[in-house]
Amino acid sequence: SQDVFILQQPSAAPPPKTLPLRPIEWGQLNFISTTDTHGWLAGHLLQPSYAADWGDYASFIEHIKETADEKGVDVIVVDDGDQHDGNGLSDATFPNGEVSQKILMMAPIDLMSIGNHELYKCEVTQQTYDMLAPHFDGRYLTSNVEIMLSNGSWVHIGQRSYRFTTKNQGINIMSFGFLFDFKLNCNNSRVSNVEDVVKQAWFQSAIREPGIDMFLVFGHYPIRFWPEIWAIHRAIRAVHKSIPIQYFGGHSHVRDFAVLDSRASALQAGRFLETVGWLSIDGLEPGKSEHSPDYDKPLKYSRRYLDFNPYSLSFHTNKTLGPDGTFATKNGKKISKLIDEYRIQLNLTYPFGCVPTDYLLEKAMYPGPNSLLSLLEDHVLENLVGDDVTLHGNSRLIFINSGSLRYDMYEGIFTVDSGYIVSPFDNAWLYIPSVPHSIAKEILGKLNSLDYIFMELTTPISRTMMVRQQNLGDTFDINVMNSLISAMSGPKDQEDLRTTGYVTIDDYGMDGDDTPHKPYPLYYLPNAVATKDAFPGDGSDPEATDVIFLDFMKPFVLDALTKINSTTPKDDWKVLEYGGKPVKELIKDYVRGWGTDCIKDMK
Ligand SMILES: O=c1ccn([C@@H]2O[C@H](COP(=O)(O)O)[C@@H](O)[C@H]2O)c(=O)[nH]1
Ligand SMILES: [Zn+2]
Ligand SMILES: [Zn+2]
């Protein structure tokens, strides 16, 4: 059994106080939004720019709501799903989210939708139905997602729609919460295609209800490039030519703002509680008939991506930090205390070893000395030992999808929590024995080919890069993109900036990031990497090799094999359980080998 080890919380590091922030712009209707929080409710303990926690967020919302009332305007708080898989607080319990979802529900969020990470595991979907949907009492929206109850009947996990009137401006809003066309869900849930759902009678009659001033369509779908948002937009616009529509999206883990037309826009608030999205709208005319002659005037929007740190959140609420400060509310303090207590109870602060340097995902060149993918490929995966001893010593190709690694590994103490942060999934290993090498050697190329872009295997990070590239024109050249970002940020300005962070280019330009940053480097990541193990010592190829991969990759590997060798039907490939430790444990073992000097230094 492990001793409880309480580390000094690095979040005690001073926040970046001197950064120039601008006050947020308020409108008649304002939104605060988060998405893809993936359990990061404790915040980023190693990164001061994102070191607020969910308690700070609750305090922020409470103050903003108070200010809205004082100003006589409205504020709506939205979360777009994906609350599991990414952090010890959500993933160290069974079912995942048992503790973190209770904490999540303590913040005064108005509307929430479901993400794909609430659907991979049956027990998590059940938990969502049992815990979140009732808590939100009609405001947890799953317009195209159902669950099968124990009696075999299908019901929506939350509600399909929610209609309400805002408190101060009296805006009559019809809202929906959609999930993208997700296919890898456990069999106790059912996701209907967005394109089909918007044709259904309930949706068609909801959008025709009289007296609606605007539509609010939020949920877990990317706001750019993916077809879902346009399917919804076309359906609403077919009935209402110019009624205001506001979209909030998620899933691709980017900061983004898109203009759909002069009275419809969409915001996406990044990932992992690095970002709080702010959006305000002016020019709404509640109660006015959409058939009035001057109804279709363009709306005025302001959008901002706030870095998730206490300094930024307190600045925007005009409150002070510190033990005697006015920022932390009673509820906020309670949440922060609970988070700290649960982190200790779950042993998340227990240290395994000391990481000698940063190992990064998209922020480092792959392959390269600081690439986390290279570390796995060159040093960690070869330590996988399968259960069947008769296989030991066989030539093998071991594949992982880069999306299974979710966050950078930073120099310094590596804790139980770090294990979940880097590799949250407990995907099992599968293998296909003795695949002719002439076929096996083609698999990686197929998995990384463009056919797989936008498929589920693609890392959220590659999707992020595509969004950023696309916003800069049609080029897919990452170097061109990076130099453009640097040029547009201005080299002189960059010297003055202290923190590295996101530099977002969206449909309104480059002034959305509230804290101006030196841009993070951004490198191309492949969908998958593979380690060669026990190949002939003379450098020749083996005749056949065992092909080993994470269970999550099975449909993609079989698909790749079929493309390479169309004469063997998919079902003829014998896929077996390989056994062995999950990626997280292999990483922990490797980290142990780096020693514990940094921990001794702290004691
Ligand atoms: O068991 C799993 C489940 C998912 N993944 C990876 O996660 C992404 C999806 O994450 P989002 O946060 O919804 O974007 C998926 O594409 C896989 O890369 C996994 O590796 N194992
Ligand atoms: Zn996500
Ligand atoms: Zn997602």
Image (cartoon, rainbow, N blue to C red):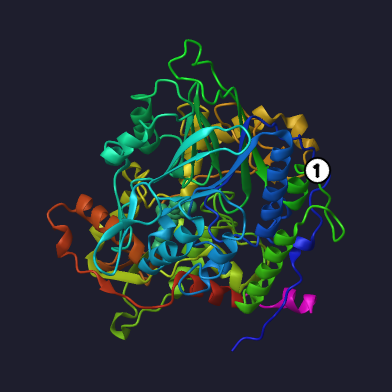
Q: Can residue 79 be seen at all in this image of the molecule?
A: yes
Q: Can residue 543 be seen at all in this image of the molecule?
A: no
Give left or right: position of 451 versus 23. left
Give left or right: position of 236 versus 482. left
Image coordinates for residue 354, horizontal then vertical, percent: 67, 72
Q: Using the image as rendered, state which of residue 122 and residue 285 is in the foreground.
A: 285
In the displayed structure, would residue 401 be above or below residue 341?
above
| Residue 68 lies in quadrant | top right
Q: Quadrant of the C terminus?
A: bottom right
In the displayed structure, would residue 131 be above or below residue 309?
below
- Residue that numbered label 1 is attached to: 318
Does residue 595 belong to the magenta stretch? Answer: yes
Q: Using the image as rendered, state which of residue 554 and residue 32 is in the foreground.
A: 32
Q: Which residues are magenta?
A: 594-603
Q: Using the image as rendered, state which of residue 16 and residue 131 is in the foreground.
A: 131
- Residue for point 25% across, 68% down: 151
Q: Secondary structure at mark 1?
A: loop
